[in-house]
Amino acid sequence: MAGDSAEGTALLEARGVRRTLGRDEARTHALRGVGITLHAGRSYAVTGPSGCGKSTLLYLLGLLDRPDEGTVSIMGRELAQAGDEERTRFRNEHVGFVFQFHFLLPEFSAQENVMLPMRRLGRASRREMLTRSALLLEQVGLADKMRRSTGHLSGGEQQRVAVARALANEPALLLADEPTGNLDERNSRLIFELLAASARRQNRAVLIVSHNPDLAARCDCVMRMRDGLFVNDG
């Protein structure tokens, strides 16, 4: 099982996870029975070539997809085969995502984009949402651009908005799929440092999928995948 030997209760545990994609001749075994354990306060990176199963694993762990076999437990709850409503509610409350192509609403301001997950959860007042979104944008260095529409921000700035949005509901688990794939070196390092610091400061588990082994090495634990399995290259 991949992960590290950190003490304490695991925040996430997945065991025997298998997933096939496609049908008939196009069917591929994306995951071949993998296991992973993540602890709060730690940052993790999964590296490997394209098509090895990294993103498939991330989406399964984040409850955006279901495994064909295996279990996925987060905060002690087995959720791999839970109902759609339960999975959606749990994901909104406890899981944050940073996608490679960030999926911001370009006509909305940076602050409005960050507020969207809080609106969806429906627990904070408008004043609380405004305060928290402003604080998060300040933390990612965009306090002076919070009212600018994201369609008029640079790629690096948009990705920083996406990081702030992923943190909006104070998730216990933060997942990032190639969050620096379209960024220059400077912004890539900035995003990685923001995510890794988030694990330490807010005691959450952060899992990052990346092609970049040098950046991945900044995380507490690096795991390599090949052909749907974790491998040890010695």
Image (tube, rainbow, N blue to C red):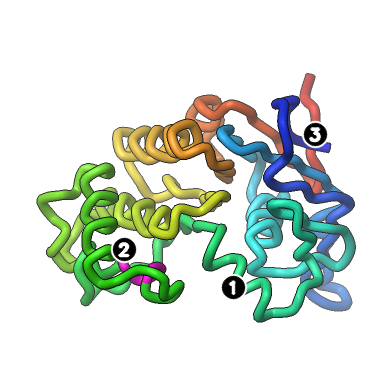
Mark 2 secondary-structure assignment: helix
Residue at image coords 50%, 57%: 96
The reply to whether residue 224 is in sight is: yes
Disc 3 element: strand
Q: What's the residue type where badge 1 is placed?
A: Arg
Residue nearest the viewer, comparing 187 with 8: 8
Residue behind mark 3: 231
Q: Which label belongs to residue 8?
A: none
- Whether 116 is among the magenta residues is yes
- Which one is in front in this view, the residue at disc 1 or the one at disc 2? 1
Q: CA distance from mark 3 to mark 2?
A: 37 Å
Residue labelled with disc 1: 89
Q: CA distance from mark 1 to mark 2?
A: 18 Å
Does residue 150 show up?
no
Which stretch appears magenta?
Answer: 114-118
* Nearer mark to the viewer, of 3 and 2: 2
Q: Is residue 181 above or below residue 126?
A: above
- Residue at point 37%, 59% (across, down): 165
Res 224 → quadrant: top right
Magenta segment's dominant SS is helix
